[in-house]
Image (spheres, grey):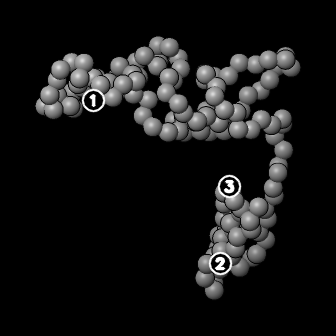
Amino acid sequence: MVWDGTGTEATGASHDLTTLAKAKEYLRAGDDDDALITNIIDRASAAIESICNRYFNTASYAGWYDGTGARTFYLEHSPVTVVARVGVGRFNALGVWHNSTSSTWATARVTSTGLTLTYKDSSGTTTSSLAF
């Protein structure tokens, strides 16, 4: 999935509910069937998660939830093991302006450690960093 700012994004490893090695041991299968068994694991895992409407393996999610004013609200994914951040409202935390008339383009990239500004003009590309 790709997060568009309104839904959720699942990141991390495959959502296979078992491993090829475990399935081969249970089925007493040899290496000749690896591709078939892997395909079955993928499809069965996807079907189970679709029917149950949830992921079973650990994954990271980011999402926006619009509360109803009630004291509780329901998350799309469970179980929750860690909550990294909770915010209220959507306010600009940082504003970036580039008003050079000689630049052909400019970008701003925010990382976990700082802000990187890059712009290109007739003298070349310039990058500046600001640590948080």
Residue 127, placed above or below residue 36: below
Residue 31, by quadrant, is top left
The residue tagged 2 is 126
125 relative position to 128: left or right: left
Q: Can you say which quadrant of the picture contains the C terminus? A: bottom right
Residue 60, placed above or below residue 18: below
The residue tagged 1 is 21
- Looking at the rendered structure, the kind of residue marked 3 is Ser
| Residue at disc 1, secondary structure | helix
The residue tagged 3 is 112
Which of discs 3 and 2 lies nearer the camera? The answer is: 3
- Looking at the rendered structure, the kind of residue marked 1 is Ala
Residue 83, by quadrant, is top right
| Residue at disc 2, secondary structure | strand
Which circle marks residue 98 in the picture?
A: none
121 relative position to 89: left or right: left
Q: Distance between the residues labelled 2 and 1?
A: 51 Å
